Amino acid sequence: MRSGMIKRILVVSVIICLIASYFFFDFDQYLSLEYIKSSRERFQVLYAEHTFTVIAVYFAVYVAATALALPAAAVLTLAGGALFGFMAGTVIVSFASSIGATVAFIVARYLLRDWVQGRFADKLRKINEGVERDGAFYLFTLRLIPIFPFFAINTVVALTPMRLFTYYWVSQVGMFPATLVYVNAGKELGRIDSFSGLLSPSLIISFAILGIFPLVMKKVLGWYQARRRKDGEI
């Protein structure tokens, strides 16, 4: 017990130091829309000369930023589209964001799950049952709607019995449509002066579709399951 507590304290200390360093050394200035726009041509030259190194560094930064819940994911996604283009940017961002979210999930589960489940076991029983029954669908729905802070989803779901692999693949699939939207916007980075530029009619329609899609899928799945029950297959 004592050894486990010491390890948790060390993990929390490392996380706090990393987050504090990010703000203390003003690293956020390098993850701003203005900096990325002004440095786009320089980054593209560097990318052409050292392709794999640039991808590896970008990937590592994205995973770290997501895992630490730093306010940089949107800018990094735009940068991915601006630097790598639509196809490569989508693939890189999709895996980096999913892996980063999974790391955050693992850390939150390691630090908090046993304590929360032990202290609030009775109150969480129904939630746990719901997650075991159809938690993947609810996670998929949350991932499709960008208004929910991803760091909150990573932490809350980590406190439930959801399996790690399920969390990873559902997150990757669920975040993919939003990744497409943001990476595509990143291609037009030169014409975006602020985040308000993301609220063009076409992007608003895209996000509206993202919000409606889970409801449509739920209806379709409900119809399919009812049909199978009627046919006596389940």
Image (cartoon, grey):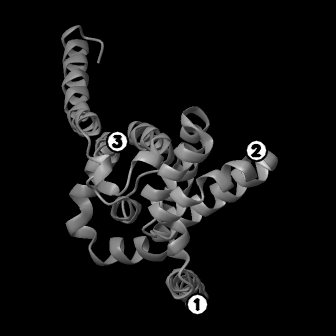
Numbered disc 2: secondary structure: helix
Residue 36 horizontal/vertical position (percent)? 54, 59
* Number of the label disc, if any, that sits on residue 140: 3
Tell which circle, 2 or 1, labels the residue nearer the N-terminal end.
1
**What crowding class fits label 2: few (fewer than 14 Cα within 10 Å), some (14-19), or many (20 or more)?**
few
Tell which tag, 1 or 3, sits nearer the viewer.
Answer: 3
User: Quadrant of residue 69 in the image?
Assistant: bottom left
Tell which tag, 2 or 1, sits nearer the viewer.
Answer: 2
What's the amino acid at mark 3?
Answer: Phe
Numbered disc 1: secondary structure: helix
Relative to 65, does residue 111 appear above or below in the rendering?
below
Numbered disc 3: secondary structure: helix
Tell which circle, 2 or 3, labels the residue nearer the N-terminal end.
2
Tell which circle, 1 or 3, labels the residue nearer the N-terminal end.
1
Observer-nearest residue: 139 or 228? 139
- The residue pinned by badge 2 equals 48
Tell which tag, 2 or 3, sits nearer the viewer.
Answer: 2
Residue 195 horizontal/vertical position (percent)? 33, 56
What's the amino acid at mark 2?
Answer: Ala
* Number of the label disc, if any, that sits on residue 6: 1
What's the amino acid at mark 1?
Answer: Ile
Alpha carbon distance from label 2 to label 3: 36 Å
Relative to 217, does residue 99 appear above or below in the rendering?
below
Residue 94 horizontal/vertical position (percent)? 53, 43
